[in-house]
Image (cartoon, helix red, strand yellow):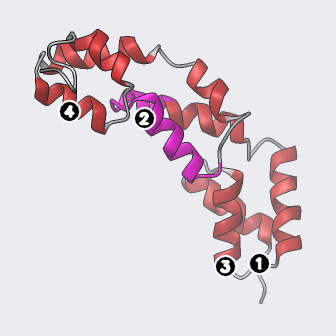
Amino acid sequence: MKRDPVDLAARALAQRDRSRRELDERLERAGVAEQARARAIETLERIGYVDDRRFALTRARSLAARGFGDAAILHDLAGRGIEGDAAAPALGELEPERERAAALAARLGRSRRTAALLARRGFDPDSIETALGADVAPGAP
């Protein structure tokens, strides 16, 4: 018995919100034909179950709360099929990256180790320098 693509997609969405591309890939792995996948996803978009802008904002907020910078957030979103029109507004809704970097620096301490952590987590060098000072930021003597 062949399962309904809308039902398969809805079950996947019951576990967690997913981007359009993630849902399409999941249905493809389940053996759903391309046209049936497209129709199912369009149906779910029409009724509001799939919304890449909402997904991008929720995901960006989650990553920012976990201490990631804008570059890492954009990279994560792009890996999930969210780019350009949906990704940029999501970043615009977040607390500015410099403020997030400063909050992390205040919590973790003003050190080269914190600077390295911020760099690994995708914070812009200017945000790191603002949060920690030029003498601690990466590339400082």
Quarter holding the C terminus is top left
**Mark drawn on residue 73:** none
Name which residue type carries label 4: Ala
The one nearer the camera, 104 or 19, is 104
Q: Please give the range of residues in magenta.
A: 61-81
* Relative to 34, 18 lies left or right: left
SS at mark 2? helix
Q: Amino acid at mark 2?
A: Leu
Nearer to me, 62 or 99 = 99
Disc 3 packing (10 Å; few <14; some 14–19; many ≥20) = few
**Up-down relation of residue 80 to residue 6 (above or below):** above
Label 3 with label 1: CB-CB less than 8 Å? yes
Residue identifier under label 3: 30
- Please state if 43 lies on the left or on the right of 60 as rendered: right
Instruction: Name the front one of labels 2 and 1.
Output: 2
Residue placed most toward the observer, 131 or 12:
131
